[in-house]
Amino acid sequence: MASRIICHNARTLGSGPRTLVFGHGLGTDQSIWRLVAPRMAVDHRVVLLDWAGCGHSDPQAFDSGRHASLRGHAHDLCELLAEEQWGPVTYVGHSAGGMIGVLAAIEQPWLFEQVVLLAASPRYLDDPPHYVGGSRPADVAALFELMDQNFLGWSSSFAAMAAKDSEVQRTLEGLFNSSDRGRLREFAESVMSSDFRAVLPELTLPALVMGTAEDDMVPTCVGEYLHAHLAGSTYVCLNLAGHCPQMTHPQQVEAELRTFMAKRPA
């Protein structure tokens, strides 16, 4: 198999004493970081990548067995970091990419310095009476049915859930519509069926949990749950609406990243 950096269409920007690796979420690719990555690349090495089956990753890198769980993507991330030897990195993961980072940092913690979870969730489905994930099984089933019967309708609906800003909605729709539909559905199944609440205490690295005040996909109570179950974590709730603040308010996301990273010695 080709090197991981080729498999994942990994690109490096900037230079500096510390390295940030940005991971995207469901249905998107590394381009969702285009407004934040250059800002951080002014004084850091920044690495952008596409998960297997997403964006411009090598089609041969996707394996339905390996990637039926987010753990498969976490293995990929560990292999990439070990291969490139960037040193312990700050990993920044959006949405499903957040839990991929958590799993990878638990698996091989020496590859990571700290983890940032942006609009991430350990479980998207409600588990009453003690856990609210933001989605009911019937809602998820309806979304999958729409995806199967009217993909363009699904992409429009999902984009509207993810963002309030019309321009960002159009960008997300374009990303969804350009995806390999079969692999996107498999990724969606692995995300929506995931439950990684039990492993959260195994993360021993510093973590920043960042969300927004109005997120139709990941309600604030999920961010609070992550904060409560990640020992020593920092929690920031941005007074914004939407699931993709890095696309709508990159300056605020950058500011929180820099504040968090400043707490650790360079």
Image (cartoon, rainbow, N blue to C red):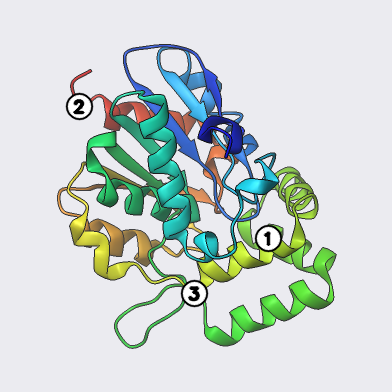
Give the vertical position of 120 relative to 43 (above or below): below
**Separation of disc 2 and disc 1 at Cα?**
38 Å
Q: Quadrant of the C terminus?
A: top left
Label 3: state its secondary structure. loop
Q: Residues within 10 Å of mark 3 (few under 14, many from 20)?
A: some
Q: Is residue 109 left or right of residue 126?
A: left
Q: Quadrant of the N terminus?
A: top right
Question: Where residue 34 sits: x, y (%)?
Answer: 61, 29
Give the vertical position of 74 relative to 127 (above or below): above
Which of 252 and 37 lies nearest the eye of the viewer?
37
Q: Which residue is mark 3?
A: 193
**Sequence order check: which comes first, mark 2 or mark 1?**
1
Quarter of the image for residue 261 reads: top left
Q: Residues within 10 Å of mark 2 (few under 14, many from 20)?
A: few
Give the residue type at disc 2: Arg
Give the residue type at disc 1: Arg
Q: Is residue 185 left or right of residue 202?
A: right
Q: Which residue is mark 2?
A: 264
Seen at 34% across and 26% down, the residue is 258
Visible in this render: residue 91?
yes
Give the residue type at disc 3: Ser
Which of 244 and 90 lies nearest the eye of the viewer?
90
Question: Where residue 198 sits: x, y (%)?
Answer: 25, 70
Give the vertical position of 187 relative to 251 (above or below): below
Q: Which residue is mark 1?
A: 183
Label 1: state its secondary structure. helix
Question: Where residue 206 sits: x, y (%)?
Answer: 21, 41
**Sequence order check: which comes first, mark 2 or mark 3?**
3
